[in-house]
Image (tube, rainbow, N blue to C red):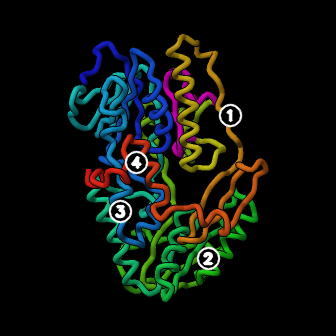
């Protein structure tokens, strides 16, 4: 269906968890005269939550790359996903790196949501824009992990912890070492969360070296099996045959910084936002930002990115419906860190307030509630597809 010429655009840079809840809400409850445009360079939504498992175990890679094509039910008057890279932001339009149908190299907008996310090392995120490239990279990880006898994982955020557990559970004969600069895991979570995680990894047989920072070589570590020596600042040497880096989060804020330097923290490179989710620069009150790219007290997880995106869309809706900028609502965070960390097929640690009080729960409860594909079915449902009823959609 051709778009109505008089429609105004709400443009979102990024097609990740930040704008996802907002896009789904908009799809089911649009405002006449407006539509939502997502600018996303990747051909498929990457269900990154399952990448640590898929980097070890083959067989379900296709389920983790979900086509955007049906996100707005194919109705361009509701919204559209544009596969291109934004190369410049202006007050009311975006420049693209390529020609795209309908727009050419320019997309005009009334409101902007900046949800460009962050860059982290593979396999947490994959530096490829295609489904084929993503599957190939996961298979590369599967192969080198299979060949390695003494893999070393550097960094114990969620990706590092999950990767270590998956390797040791799937290949119990391997000598798996996990190195972490802090003395506890996931410090924004409860101490009991740390203790449960440590004990599960210990049960699996993962060697855990904490409180010692790795000296990283400038060239990084190659994704190949061969002798490797890891040096730490205390002078320790750890030897293995495969090193995988799971540290380092770089905000993708350069694009906004070029237009509005005052909206990006010079040290952290995170986007500075008001409690209304508007960027700090008063010249652009119609610019909003959400997700991992922003400077916020929320833990950087898909859940909180989703909630921030909804808060930004709530205020955009208010503006469309006639509110002034002085009447926007603040985003009220739950202020607690929520997460479900999977540590193999039967083990997990969950921090939740679903029962009222914030608690951390171990494997007996949380480990038996995680499906093999780490809830990838939900991602297909977000895109208006059902990969179980129609398995052929996996080849899209």
Which sits in the foreground, 236 or 363?
363
Please identify the dominant SS of the magenta region: loop
> Which one is closest to the eye, mark 2 or mark 3?
3
Q: Which residue is mark 2?
A: 201
Nearer-N-terminus badge (2/3) = 3
Q: Which residue is mark 3?
A: 61
Q: Position of residue 267 (x, y in %)?
A: 57, 47
Alpha carbon distance from label 4 to label 2: 31 Å
Residue at image location 54% in from the left, 41% down from the top: 306
Q: Position of residue 181 (x, y in %)?
A: 62, 69
Q: Which residue is mark 4?
A: 380
Q: Is residue 284 left or right of residue 147?
A: right
Residue at image location 42% in from the left, 19% down from the top: 110
* Label 1 crowd bin: few (<14), some (14–19), many (20+), radius 10 Å: few
Nearer-N-terminus badge (4/3) = 3
Nearer-N-terminus badge (1/3) = 3
Q: Is residue 266 left or right of residue 259?
A: right
Secondary structure, mark 1, is loop
Alpha carbon distance from label 4 to label 1: 29 Å
Which sits in the foreground, 113 or 219?
113
Residues in magenta, as a range: 275-294
Q: Which residue is mark 1?
A: 332
Residue at image location 43% in from the left, 83% down from the top: 228
Whether residue 215 is visible: no
Relative to 163, residue 351 above or below:
above
Alpha carbon distance from label 2 to label 3: 25 Å
Picture quarter with the N terminus: top left
């Amino acid at each position: 269906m051709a778009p109505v010429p008089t429609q105004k655009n709400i443009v979102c840079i990024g097609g990740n968890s930040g704008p996802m809840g907002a896009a789904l809400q908009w799809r089911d409850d649009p405002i006449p005269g407006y539509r939502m445009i997502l600018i996303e360079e990747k051909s498929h939504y990457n269900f990154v939550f399952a990448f640590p498992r898929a980097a070890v175990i083959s067989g379900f890679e296709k389920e983790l790359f979900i086509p955007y094509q049906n996100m707005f039910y194919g109705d361009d008057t509701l919204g559209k996903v544009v596969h291109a890279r934004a190369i410049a932001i202006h007050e009311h339009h975006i420049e693209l790196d390529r020609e795209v149908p309908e727009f050419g190299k320019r997309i005009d907008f009334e409101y902007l949501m900046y949800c460009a996310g962050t860059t982290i090392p593979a396999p947490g995120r994959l530096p490829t824009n295609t489904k084929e490239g993503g599957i190939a990279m996961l298979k590369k990880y599967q192969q080198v992990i299979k060949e390695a006898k003494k893999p070393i994982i550097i960094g114990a955020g969620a990706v590092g912890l999950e990767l270590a557990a998956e390797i040791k559970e799937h290949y119990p004969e391997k000598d798996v070492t996990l190195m972490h600069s802090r003395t506890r895991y996931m410090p924004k979570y409860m101490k009991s969360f740390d203790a449960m995680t440590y004990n599960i990894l210990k049960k699996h047989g993962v060697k855990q070296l904490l409180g010692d920072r790795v000296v990283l070589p400038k060239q990084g570590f190659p994704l190949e099996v061969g002798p490797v020596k890891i040096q730490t600042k205390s002078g320790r040497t750890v030897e293995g045959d495969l090193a995988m880096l799971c540290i380092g989060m770089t905000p993708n804020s350069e694009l906004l910084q070029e237009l509005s330097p005052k909206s990006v923290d010079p040290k952290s490179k995170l986007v500075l936002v008001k409690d209304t989710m508007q960027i700090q620069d008063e010249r652009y009150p119609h610019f909003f930002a959400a997700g991992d790219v922003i400077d916020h007290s929320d833990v950087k997880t898909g859940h909180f990115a989703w909630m921030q995106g909804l808060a930004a869309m709530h205020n955009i809706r208010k503006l469309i419906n006639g509110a002034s900028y002085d009447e926007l609502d603040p985003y009220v965070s739950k202020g607690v860190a929520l997460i479900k960390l999977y540590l193999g097929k039967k083990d997990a640690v969950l921090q939740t307030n679903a029962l009222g009080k914030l608690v951390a729960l171990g494997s007996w409860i949380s480990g038996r509630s995680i499906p093999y594909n780490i809830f990838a079915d939900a991602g297909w449902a977000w895109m208006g597809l059902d990969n179980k009823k129609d398995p052929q959609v996996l080849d899209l």
